[in-house]
Image: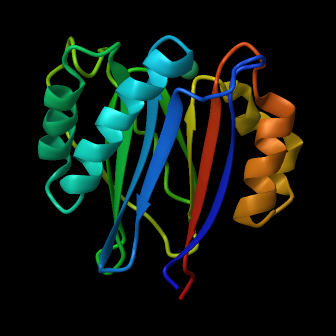
């Protein structure tokens, strides 16, 4: 009801498993959206991503910093991961973001919302975490993606086609997904008034 969701993902060319994964926890007054990229490739990357997934899933209602720290603990001894955490508060129309490592977030909004991820590796080297908060307008679209997606998509003509989330995710993957890395694109469109 509150979110229209589209997801497109595929493993690196020649790999059976992806080291990327994602979480969407929606259904209350807020939602949590996470994109996780286990470092390296194949099974070891997938194992790191699974550990992060479980920690985030368990703690998904906590503040973002606590969720990220739980993932950090869980990923110690694994390959490590890069993670983006987005919280949407549907009544305050507030978006909060924490990203560690190369996860991208692009927001289609009248507001200028440009949250950035910080350098680091979850499980190894955590930067100081600061939640970046912005107001959004109902109807805004949030696109989170792993580094298997070229960030050039944000300037592509397809961004002006007003596509619903699933076709938009599919088109971004198709046109801007790299074959040399795992690819994940998560698109969530907030409900308009
Ligand atoms: Mn990657």
For the point 66% across and 18% down, which residue is it? 181
The answer to whether residue 137 is above or below residue 76 is below
Tell me the colour scheme of the image.
rainbow
The answer to whether residue 14 is above or below residue 100 is above
For the point 86% across and 47% down, which residue is it? 158
Q: Nearer the viewer, residue 83 or 137?
A: 83
Point out residue 79 in the picture as x, y percentages from the top left corner: 35, 13
Quadrant of the rendered image holding ligand 1: top right
Q: Nearer the viewer, residue 171 or 161?
A: 171
Point out residue 81 in the picture as x, y percentages from the top left corner: 37, 22
Q: Nearer the viewer, residue 104 or 45?
A: 45
Q: Nearer the viewer, residue 75 or 146?
A: 75
The answer to whether residue 100 is above or below residue 94 is above
Q: How many marks?
A: 0
Point out residue 124 in the picture as x, y percentages from the top left corner: 21, 12
Q: Is residue 72 left or right of residue 155?
A: left
Q: Is residue 69 left or right of residue 105?
A: left
Point out residue 42 in the picture as x, y percentages from the top left corner: 56, 18
For the point 70% across and 62% down, which residue is it? 165
Q: Is residue 109 visible?
A: no
For the point 44% across and 64% down, which residue is it? 136
Specify the quadrant of the image occupied by residue 92. Answer: bottom left
Specify the quadrant of the image occupied by residue 119. Answer: top left
Q: Is residue 138 visible?
A: yes
Q: Is residue 128 left or right of residue 45?
A: left
């Amino acid at each position: 009801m509150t979110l229209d969701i589209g997801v497109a993902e595929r493993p690196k060319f020649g790999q059976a498993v992806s080291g990327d994964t994602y979480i969407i926890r929606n259904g209350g007054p807020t939602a949590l959206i996470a994109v996780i990229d286990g470092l390296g490739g194949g099974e070891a990357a997938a194992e790191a991503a699974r550990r992060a997934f479980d920690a985030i899933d368990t703690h998904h209602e906590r503040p973002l910093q606590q969720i990220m720290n739980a993932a950090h603990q869980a990923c110690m001894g694994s390959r490590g991961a890069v993670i983006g955490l987005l919280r949407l508060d549907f009544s305050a129309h507030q978006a909060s973001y924490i990203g560690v490592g190369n996860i991208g977030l692009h927001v289609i909004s009248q507001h200028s919302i440009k949250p950035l991820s910080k350098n680091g590796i979850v499980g190894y080297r955590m930067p100081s975490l600061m939640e970046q908060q912005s107001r959004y307008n109902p109807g805004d679209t949030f696109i989170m993606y792993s580094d298997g997606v070229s960030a050039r998509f944000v300037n592509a003509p397809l961004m002006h086609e007003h596509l619903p989330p699933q076709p938009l995710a599919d088109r971004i993957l198709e046109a801007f997904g790299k074959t040399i890395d795992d690819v994940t694109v998560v698109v969530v469109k907030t409900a308009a008034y």
